């Protein structure tokens, strides 16, 4: 196992698609995407928690970083929300990608049936009074090609299309989505 060069460090997000089968919630598949570290997308929350807890053994036994200390921003919430519109009990798990072992682990995760899919993002126009007064940026959208990885041959996952919306007046979404590395 070797360390990756720092420019290859990533946070791996796994959306666990959860559906109801025979009265029980089961994981139907996963969508994987990677995010780069940045000044506002980092493990600072974990560093702050580490500063408060000096017990190194406890930190490693409980897992590091803790799931609640991984960054989550409007892009992560938007992607999960699009999936939850169709699979409401879906959730996200995060991991660090610092070593060659982490890359190998992702390849193992991906050794499943693959269902090509898309997530289409468009601005939320629910507050628009007159459709003819749409600003130019309201006409922008974004389509992300994604794969759903599953152990099951499930018809519900074939040709899946997810739809997400974003705040028209919020943070620039398109540029942020272009930086997301879907697997």
Image (cartoon, rainbow, N blue to C red):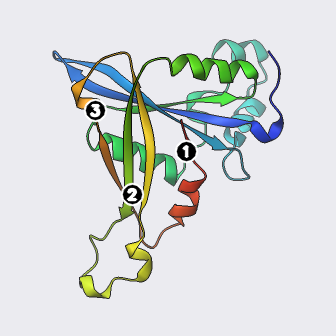
Q: Which mark is residue 72?
A: 1
The label shown at residue 158 is: 3
Q: Which residue is mark 2?
A: 121
Earlier sequence position, callout 2 versus callout 1: 1
Mark 1 and mark 3 in contact? Answer it, CB < 8 Å: no
Specify the label residue 177 is tagged with.
Answer: none
User: Nearer the observer, disc 2 or disc 1?
Assistant: 2
Foreground mark, 2 or 3? Answer: 3
Q: Is residue 74 above or below residue 138?
A: above
11 horizontally vs 171: left or right: right
Give the left or right position of residue 61, taking residue 81 as reference.
right
Q: Cα distance, mark 1 to mark 3?
A: 28 Å
Disc 1, SS: loop
Query: In terms of depth relative to the viewer, which is nearer, 17 or 182?
Result: 182
Residue 165 in the image, given as x and y percentages of width and height: 36, 59
Residue lying at 22% horizontally and 26% vertically, measured from the top left? 155
Q: Residue furthest left?
A: 22
């Amino acid at each position: 196992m070797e360390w990756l060069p720092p420019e290859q460090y990533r946070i791996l997000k796994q959306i666990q698609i959860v559906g109801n089968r025979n009265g029980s919630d089961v994981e139907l598949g996963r969508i994987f995407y990677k995010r780069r570290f940045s000044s506002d997308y980092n493990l600072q929350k974990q560093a702050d928690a580490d500063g408060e807890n000096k017990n190194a053994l406890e930190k490693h036994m409980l897992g590091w970083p803790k799931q609640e200390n991984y960054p989550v921003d409007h892009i992560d919430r938007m992607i999960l929300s699009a999936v939850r519109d169709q699979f409401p009990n879906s959730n996200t798990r995060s991991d660090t990608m610092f070593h060659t072992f982490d890359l190998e682990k992702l390849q193992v995760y991906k050794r499943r049936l693959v269902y090509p899919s898309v997530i289409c993002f468009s601005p939320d126009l629910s507050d628009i009074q007159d459709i003819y007064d749409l600003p130019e940026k309201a006409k922008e959208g974004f389509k992300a090609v994604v794969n759903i990885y599953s152990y099951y041959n499930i018809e519900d996952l074939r040709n899946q299309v997810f739809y997400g919306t974003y705040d028209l007046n919020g943070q620039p979404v398109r540029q942020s989505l272009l930086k997301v590395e879907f697997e």
